[in-house]
Amino acid sequence: HTGGFLDGLLSMSYEKFVLDVDFCGALHTYVRGVAVTEEDLAFDAEAEVGPGGHFFGCQHTIRHYETAYWESDLADNDPWETWSEKGALDAATRANARWKAMLAAYAPPPLDEGIREALDDFVARRKAGVEDAWH
C-alpha cells in the first residue's frame, strides 16, 4: 500500500509516505511503456557515433538525456565512497529530512473567509453531535 501505511493500515509513517510518493513517480513513468518510434530507437545515433565511438556528444543524446530516464528525488546513486563521505544517509534519513522540509515550506492555499467560517461551523456541529470521543 502506498500512502505511508504500515502494519496493515493500522499506522502510517511520514518517511514511508515520502518514499511511496517517490516510488509512485517511478511507476508513473514505467506504465507509459516503451516507445518504438524511429526517434526512440535511435538508429541515427548509432550511425552518427559509429564503431568505437561514444554517445555522450551525439545529437540524439543531447536531445533526450534529460527525459530518457526517471530519476528518484530520494535515492542516492552516488558511488559508495561518495555516499559515505556525504554522511552515509540511508533512505529513511533522507525521507525524514524531505517531509520536514516539505512541511516547513507549506503555505495553505487562499480560502475565502466565508467558506472558512462555513467549514468551521460544519465541523463544530458535527463534533457536537458525537459523544465525547477522540476530539
Image (cartoon, rainbow, N blue to C red):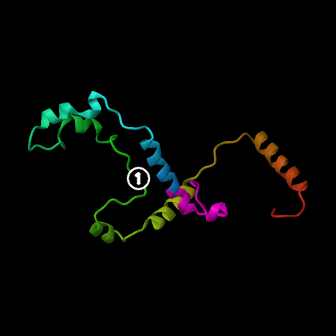
From this view, report whether residue 58 is shown above or below residue 84.
above
Q: Position of 18 compared to 87: left or right?
A: right
Q: In this view, which residue lies farthest toward the left?
A: 52
User: Pointer 1: what residue?
Assistant: 72
Q: Position of residue 70 (x, y in %)?
A: 38, 46
Question: What type is the residue that disc 1 sits on?
Answer: Ser
Name the image quarter holding residue 115: top right
Q: Position of 97 compared to 129: left or right?
A: left
Give the residue drawn at x 56%, y 54%: 2
Residue range (magenta): 1-19
Residue situated in front as seen by the camera: 35 or 95: 35
Q: Identify the secondary structure beneath mark 1.
A: loop
Q: Position of 58 compared to 99: left or right?
A: left
| Residue 9 is inside the magenta segment | yes
From this view, report whether residue 17 is shown above or below residue 34.
below
Quadrant containing the C terminus is bottom right
